[in-house]
Image (cartoon, grey):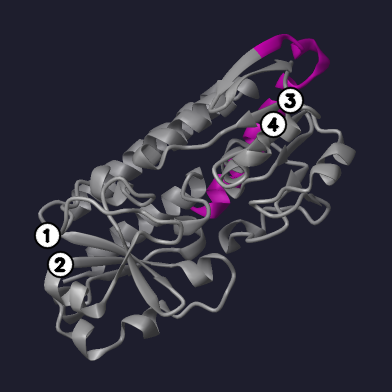
Amino acid sequence: MPMTQLRTAAFLAMLAWAGAASPGHAEPTVVRHAQGATTLDGVPRTVVVTDWAAFDNLQALGVPVAGVPASATPPYLADLVPTETLRVGSLQEPDIEGIAAAQPDLAIVANRSRRAYPTLTELTPTLDMTVDNADIVGGVKASLVQYGAIFGLAARAAELTAALDAKVAEARAAAQGRGTGLVIVTNGGRLGVYGPGSRVAWIYDALAIPSVFASVDDGDHGGDAVSYEYLLDKNPDWLFVVDRDAGIGQEGSARATLDNELVHGTTFWRKNQIVFLDPAAAYVTMHGYTGLMLLLDQVIAGYRGGA
């Protein structure tokens, strides 16, 4: 869905949220999440998130957010954050005092910030919306459905999950019969690989793109370190690239890193079958609806434009 249509739909959903959050809808509910269960006294009106994927999902649903991380703002989300929004620390170290001062009805942690849950839950109702990397598509859909139930936006959540299913099907069809794939990450001039079971496993699993190997140790910053010789030896038909440096707001150079004689001998280079994934969406907000839809669109465009 184009960004303008997404904003319109989100605005309409926001109107629905405003109605659901009125005093007449103050029934307590128990929400189960990654670190237990939390009781909410009605629909939360002041929400603080310590994770950009959580902001992404709430924004898609049309739920206003009062506080967001102060670091690593994804460029594709930057224009959607109101200037008056409170900044509540880094992804790994939320500003507990700042969150407490905001007196939110709900705080949300997730993958990178989940260690703050025990402290935050002492201050305000808190949810851990961590998504399992082994099923990112399913996790994003589950998050949307859960948020929809919390904020009285079940219909909007159903629309989004249906759109995501359709986009996955479109990408899967585009990739069918187009050969093997490999997902790599560039980090400070070095290369790492992502395989089945890693944080970008949806490319193999959800899209049925055959991997050039069975498994990989998905480390903190991109799995197993590999060489240019490795790329030439494995020689995938398609290469999907995550520029970690650009993803965390540093100077990215994935294209330059790959431009060398050994890589020039690979099938993906000769046929121009390289898809540079949005760095922030792929590395920071891969658990967010809008980010995942953006990545799927890039995969589809790659296959439609490739040899």
State which quadrant residue 90 falls in. bottom right
Q: Which mark is residue 98?
A: none
State which quadrant residue 187 falls in. bottom left
**Kind of residue at disc 2:** Asp
The range drawn in magenta is 1-29
Name the residue tied to disc 4. 118
Labels 3 and 4: the sequence-earlier one: 4
Labels 2 and 3: the sequence-earlier one: 3
* Count of numbered marks: 4
Q: Which mark is residue 237?
A: 2
Front of the two marks 2 and 3: 3
State which quadrant residue 299 falls in. bottom left
- Whether the residues at callouts 1 and 2 have beta carbons within 8 Å, the answer is yes
Examine the structure image and report whether residue 18 is included in the region drawn in magenta: yes
Dot 2: few (<14), some (14–19), or many (≥20) neighbours within 10 Å?
many
* Residue 192 on image: x %, y %: 34, 67
Distance from Cα at disc 3 to Cα at disc 1: 48 Å
